[in-house]
Amino acid sequence: MKNIIRTTLLIAGLFFLSNCSSDQVEPIAFQGEAIKVNVSQAQSLDDTGFSSASGKLVAKSSVNVSTRMMGYITSFPIEVGQQVTKGQLLVAINNTDIQAKSAQIDAQIMQAQANFDIAKKDYERFKNLFNSQSASQKELDDMSARFQMAKAGLEAAKQMKNEINSQYKYTNITAPVTGVVTSKFAQQGDLANPGMPLLSIESSSDLQAQLMVSESIISQLETGMPIDVIIKSTGEEVKGVIGEISPSSVQTGGQFIVKANIPNAKNLLAGMYVNAKFPVNSNRDSNSDDNSNVIIPKSALVKKGQLVGVYTISDQNTAILRWLKIGNDHGDQVEVLSGLQVGEKFIVSAEGRLYNGSLVKLN
């Protein structure tokens, strides 16, 4: 009886699996007309003649303004975004203590000046007496030492006055450069401390594109090389010239920092994100099996969650979604690390909604 039950269950299971298998392989008939598509071929990055890197605009001249004096801020008329010129008053700090000390130094100078005048007259008198043999050498030496001490005392008092005067500029802080105020770190009435930044100023007409460049192309770049810089937010393209190349990537995650000067920075702002195009050498080792130089337009990409792919065309003229591993951005194009070979065709645009297995025809 048990054998009969086992045989019956086995036959039923095989029948069920046979039905499931036939359902999976049964083709789905396409309903409707073929979708018109535009196709392109995957290019090698070397064939484009350029590489690219992303970054942002930074001010070539940027300073944080602070003071060496402690005191309450009595005036802070500057606002964020305001244009300032070199030498313009930015911050005033209470200087009552310095004024009192300055008055004390003035009194010391007057006293030192009086002592100097008396010592000078005594020295000249004893010098004449010594010449007429009416005073001894020791008396002349004593008057000379007294005169030199009075002279040194007067000079010391004057230097103290210079020190006080130099401290005044830290209570009336002026702009060290011409530019735009980008940040304020204090307000009127706050207590300013030595070394505490009060505001920051950036040069508005002197910008640089700070770019992160991979090691694969850093050896081909040099200062003075012209590049194209594209502003991401507006699509505007401006010319730049490489001004600085960092020789190390230890502190920047394997990416080298390259700064390009932007001569015409009108209407551009520090902090804007950019892409830059670099001319590259198309010569490449033919024995290399590196496939990371495939490049395709970003507009052809299909995104589903964290996955990124592209539609290709099968031999039966149907669309096939192929998942890709994406690399660096290159302006309006992107590098493909795996999933697509150089020369393979892919769909750039379609006149309808594509899905796996949809019938397509070339536009």
Image (tube, rainbow, N blue to C red):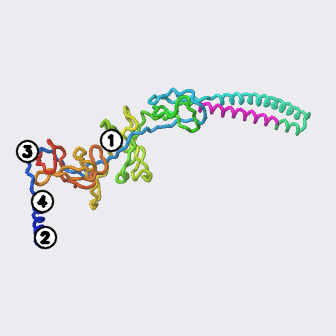
User: Cβ–Cβ below 8 Å for labels 1 and 4?
Assistant: no
Identify which amino acid the numbered label 1 is placed on.
Answer: Asp
Residue with the mark numbered 4: 20
Q: Quadrant of the rendered structure where residue 340 is?
A: bottom left
Residue with the mark numbered 1: 228
Q: Which residues are magenta?
A: 146-171
Percent across and percent down for residue 162 are 66, 33
Q: Main secondary structure of the magenta part?
A: helix
Using residue 290 as the reference point, say whether residue 5 is left or right of it.
Answer: left
- Closer to us: mark 3 or mark 1? 3
Earlier in the chain: of badge 1 and badge 2, it is 2
Q: CA distance from mark 1 to mark 4?
A: 58 Å
Percent across and percent down for residue 78 are 49, 28
- Closer to us: mark 1 or mark 2? 2
Identify which amino acid the numbered label 3 is placed on.
Answer: Glu
Q: Quadrant of the C terminus?
A: top left
What residue lies at 69% left-to-right and 30% top-to-bottom?
A: 101
Q: Quadrant of the N terminus?
A: bottom left
Q: Is 163 inside the magenta-drawn segment?
A: yes
Percent across and percent down for residue 303 are 24, 47
Residue with the mark numbered 3: 33
Earlier in the chain: of badge 3 and badge 4, it is 4
- Closer to us: mark 4 or mark 2? 2
**Rendered view: 28 above or below 133:** below
Using residue 311 as the reference point, say whether residue 216 is left or right of it.
Answer: right
- Look at the numbered disc 2 and give the secondary structure of its residue: helix
Q: Of all residues shown, which one is farthest toward the right?
A: 134
- Look at the numbered disc 4 and give the secondary structure of its residue: helix
Q: Is 119 inside the magenta-drawn segment?
A: no
What residue lies at 22% left-to-right and 54% top-to-bottom?
A: 342
User: Cβ–Cβ below 8 Å for labels 1 and 2?
Assistant: no
Q: Is the residue marked by circle 3 packed among few (<14), some (14-19), or many (20+) residues within 10 Å?
A: few
